[in-house]
């Protein structure tokens, strides 16, 4: 039994360390090892009418900030458990580290995915990424249709991502439950939040309208840099 707990604890430490590295790789903000809420590169109302200013404010200041604070709290508890060699305590913190750390990663990338129309939001992809989308899906419209279908297929809460495979360079669409971050062999390029807090105040149960409208503010220039 002790060997199982030790293995679980090791996995917990590896996953927690991996998430901390993801913050650095993704360029996410932190101070002395703590995650911090990033500033948005635009005003809360800048994405209207696609996403209301009220949704953006609640989403950023309330929801994202909760993930940041909760991740930091869980990380502090993990360090304390490690210091005491509390193996069960360390293992129990893994879901919190993954959920809140993933929420911070996902949302930080999500804000960069978006831009007002006056700043290029909605402009189509260009260059190598456009070529990859055309070769994989036929054209941008076909890609968006498949991406929206993936979003609509999420049961409960989660995200859909355009990802790039590290080993092949191929792109693809993947969905992740809850706040699971894109890790392993995949690089996150473009993510859309399918949690209700991202759209319900404005779109209510018409989430398909939200999935369709958000392409008008997608910042493909930021996506191209990740590609």
Image (tube, rainbow, N blue to C red):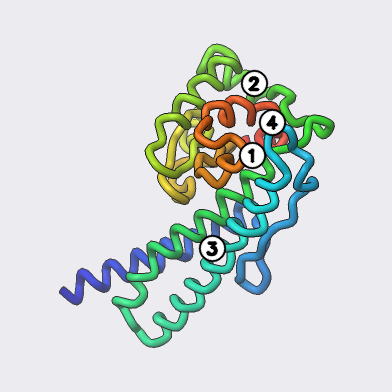
Residue extending furthest toward the left = 1
Q: Is residue 180 left or right of residue 47?
A: left
Q: Position of residue 9 (x, y in %)?
A: 32, 71
**Which of the 4 image quadrants contains residue 128?**
top right
Callout 1: helix, strand or loop?
Answer: helix
Q: Position of residue 5 (x, y in %)?
A: 24, 72
User: Could you tell me which residue is drawn at 75 percent across and 47 percent down?
Assistant: 44
Q: Is residue 62 left or right of residue 82?
A: right
Callout 2: helix, strand or loop?
Answer: helix
User: Could you tell me which residue is drawn at 74 percent across and 51 percent down?
Assistant: 40
Q: Which mark's residue is nearer the viewer, 4 or 2?
A: 4
Q: Decide: few, some or many residues near mark 2? Use Cα within 10 Å; few <14, some 14-19, many ≥20.
A: some
Nearest to N terminus: mark 2 or mark 1: 2
**Which of the 4 image quadrants contains residue 21?**
bottom right
Q: Decide: few, some or many residues near mark 4? Use Cα within 10 Å; few <14, some 14-19, many ≥20.
A: many
How far, Cα to Cα, is label 2 from label 3?
31 Å
**Quadrant placement of the C terminus:** top right
Q: Which mark's residue is nearer the viewer, 4 or 3?
A: 4
User: Could you tell me which residue is drawn at 34 percent across and 68 percent down?
Assistant: 10
Which one is in front, 56 or 18? 56
How far, Cα to Cα, is label 2 from label 1?
13 Å
Which one is in front, 120 or 163? 120
The residue that mark 3 highlights is 20
Pointer 2 and pointer 3: residues touching (CB < 8 Å)? no
The residue that mark 1 highlights is 226
Q: Position of residue 152 (x, y in %)?
A: 45, 29
């Amino acid at each position: 039994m002790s060997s199982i707990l030790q293995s679980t604890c090791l996995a917990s430490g590896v996953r927690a360390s991996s998430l901390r590295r993801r913050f650095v790789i993704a360029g996410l903000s932190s101070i002395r090892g703590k995650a911090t809420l990033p500033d948005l590169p635009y005003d809360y109302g800048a994405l209207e009418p696609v996403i209301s200013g009220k949704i953006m404010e609640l989403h950023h200041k309330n929801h994202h900030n909760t993930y940041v604070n909760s991740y930091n709290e869980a990380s502090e508890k993990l360090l304390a458990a490690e210091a005491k060699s509390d193996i069960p305590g360390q293992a129990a913190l893994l879901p919190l580290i993954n959920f809140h750390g993933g929420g911070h990663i996902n949302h930080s990338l999500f804000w960069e995915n978006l831009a007002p129309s006056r700043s290029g939001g909605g402009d189509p992809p260009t260059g190598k990424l456009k070529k990859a989308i055309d070769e994989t899906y036929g054209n941008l419209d076909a890609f968006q249709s498949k991406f929206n279908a993936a979003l609509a297929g999420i049961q409960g809460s989660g995200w859909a991502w355009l990802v790039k495979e590290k080993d092949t360079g191929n792109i693809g669409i993947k969905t992740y439950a809850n706040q699971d971050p894109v890790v392993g062999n995949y690089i996150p390029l473009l993510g859309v939040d399918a949690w209700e807090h991202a759209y319900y105040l404005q779109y209510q149960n018409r989430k398909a309208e939200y999935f369709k409208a958000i392409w008008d503010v997608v910042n493909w220039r930021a996506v191209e840099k990740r590609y």
